[in-house]
Image (cartoon, grey):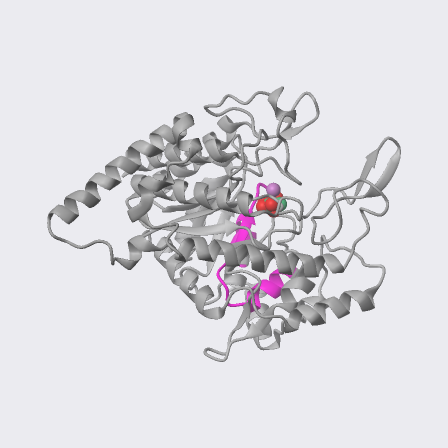
């Protein structure tokens, strides 16, 4: 046992939801008025939880199945949710694409797909630079709507505690609507042929989806012809949908953390699952301290700067009981690096007998600037990283358990390539993201089909 793990175990009793406050912390905003901030946090701590410990435990059980090779994790949504893009239409379109991707993936994997949104709380952003300069004016960087405003002005870039309240309210309304869609019949596989919207009839991916739908419908008809009644099968009528975000802004997370009466554990009720970003995962710093004490399923990004021993320590600190479903590792190496970097981590984790879900984020290692200065991601690089991820796991005899995407249900032009052949010139047409470029609805579904094919090949 390493020293860090030992220290961590002896410290276990010393954990409180605020014990992170004594440690160094990165990527936090400073507020002009601490009293106002504390006021807001105190209000949030009394608000009803956005999710409940029961739901959180249900997700952990589903992720334990994924960890054991009996399921597949689909995690996706905005890079940064924004107050401006909050609407029924956007949420509905998002949910529909997630369901379509789910069907495509279920078809390929033959396994249940665990759906976790990067949504209902994905507001705070870590930034590479603290400041942004435009035409000689230097202002603090935009850190997400929960902190400041994207507008490049002195006023816009001020950190405003009131934004925490707005984010909490948007997160609750978002999850309320998505839960209703998931549980209220909208997600019923029995109605799958009714999902035929304009996108399905007009696009290549849509037609492909319609083809899968008709095959699923045929199966249902066959089963019913055998005399089995499907209308009352709960599993076909509703879907589980869970929320997640980067647990970056610890005062906000702490305010929503509570001890559950049932098992006495602490749950961060701001989301079902939380992850630690690649910039804030240093051992012995505040984020690891907070995360080790909450009982939610959690994840950590694993980027190119990760070291082998560091990863093992991180896993032991975050999952000392080696509980399946507790910890997901989201690798985000970049298409050109993954085959060199990932195998040694996968091999070591396997050798140490550590239970983790391996997931692939093919977005954050593949961001480039187009010649006209716009941040984008080539669809082919995204696809190539996903393919390499599956090959590495196949070669190492380990389970590739999931994928993590930045995507939207809207018809944006932010990532280049894909069947729609979005070019660098197209980027400025519908570029709406508040942070990183997202896959649009068609690209998301195309990717899900391509993954589905990869998985079928490897079965
Ligand atoms: C993110 O997922 O939005 C992000 C910032 O990723 P990473 O921490 O991997 O850079
Ligand atoms: Co991002």
Which image quarter: residue 290? Answer: bottom right
Q: Which residues are magenta?
A: 287-313
Residue at position x 62%, y 65% in the image: 289
Tell me if residue 353 can be seen: no
Q: Is residue 173 above or below residue 201?
A: below
Which image quarter: residue 258? Answer: bottom right
Near-viewer residue (75 or 356): 75
Tell me if residue 90 can be seen: yes
Q: Quadrant of ligand 2?
A: top right
Q: Is residue 265 above or below residue 286?
A: below
Which image quarter: residue 282? Answer: bottom right
Residue at position x 80%, y 47% in the image: 157
Near-viewer residue (181 or 285): 181
Question: In the rendered image, which quarter contains the C terminus?
Answer: top left
Image position, residue 159 (x, y; %): 79, 54
In the rendered image, the residue lying farthest to the right is 136
In the rendered image, the residue lying farthest to the left is 226
Is-magenta flag for residue 444? no
Image position, residue 21 (x, y; %): 71, 67
Residue at position x 60%, y 50% in the image: 277
Image position, residue 50 (x, y; %): 55, 64
Image position, residue 429 (x, y; %): 63, 25
């Amino acid at each position: 046992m390493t020293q860090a793990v030992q220290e961590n175990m002896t410290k276990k009793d010393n954990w409180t939801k605020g014990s992170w406050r004594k440690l160094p912390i990165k990527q936090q905003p400073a507020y002009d008025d601490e009293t106002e901030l504390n006021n807001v946090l105190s209000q949030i701590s009394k608000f009803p939880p956005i999710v409940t410990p029961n739901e959180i435990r249900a997700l952990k059980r589903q992720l334990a199945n994924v960890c054991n090779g009996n399921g597949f994790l689909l995690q996706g949504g905005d890079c940064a949710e924004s107050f401006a893009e909050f609407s029924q239409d956007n949420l509905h379109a998002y949910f529909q694409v997630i369901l379509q991707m789910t069907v495509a993936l279920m078809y390929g994997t033959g396994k249940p797909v665990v759906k976790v949104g990067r949504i209902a709380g994905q507001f705070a952003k870590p930034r590479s630079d603290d400041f942004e300069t435009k035409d000689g004016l230097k202002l603090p960087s935009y850190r997400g709507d929960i902190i400041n405003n994207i507008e490049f002005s002195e006023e816009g870039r001020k950190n405003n505690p009131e934004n925490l309240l707005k984010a909490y309210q948007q997160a609750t309304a978002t999850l309320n609507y998505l839960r209703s869609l998931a549980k209220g019949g909208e997600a019923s596989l029995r109605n799958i042929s009714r999902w035929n919207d304009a996108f399905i009839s007009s696009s290549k991916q849509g037609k492909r989806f319609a083809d899968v739908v008709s095959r699923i419908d045929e199966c249902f008809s066959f089963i019913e012809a055998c005399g089995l009644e499907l209308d009352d099968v709960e599993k076909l009528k509703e879907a589980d949908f869970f929320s997640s975000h980067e647990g970056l802004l610890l005062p906000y997370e702490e305010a929503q953390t509570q001890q559950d009466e049932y098992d006495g554990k602490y749950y961060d009720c701001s989301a079902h699952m939380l992850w630690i970003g690649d910039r804030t995962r240093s051992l012995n710093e505040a984020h690891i301290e907070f995360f080790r004490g909450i009982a939610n399923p959690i994840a950590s990004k694993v980027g190119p700067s990760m070291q082998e021993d560091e990863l093992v320590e991180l896993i032991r600190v975050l999952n000392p009981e080696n509980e399946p479903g507790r910890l997901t590792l989201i690798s985000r190496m970049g298409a050109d690096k993954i085959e060199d970097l990932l195998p040694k981590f996968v091999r070591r984790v396997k050798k140490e007998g550590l239970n983790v879900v391996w997931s692939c984020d093919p977005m954050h290692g593949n961001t480039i600037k187009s010649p006209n200065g716009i941040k984008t991601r080539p669809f082919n690089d995204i696809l190539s990283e996903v393919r390499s991820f599956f090959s590495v796991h196949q070669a190492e005899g380990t389970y590739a358990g999931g994928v993590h995407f930045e995507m939207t249900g809207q018809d944006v032009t932010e990532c280049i390539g894909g069947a729609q052949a979005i070019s660098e010139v197209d980027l400025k047409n519908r570029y709406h993201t508040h942070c990183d470029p997202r896959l649009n609805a068609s690209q998301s579904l195309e990717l899900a089909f391509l993954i589905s094919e990869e998985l079928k090949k490897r079965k």
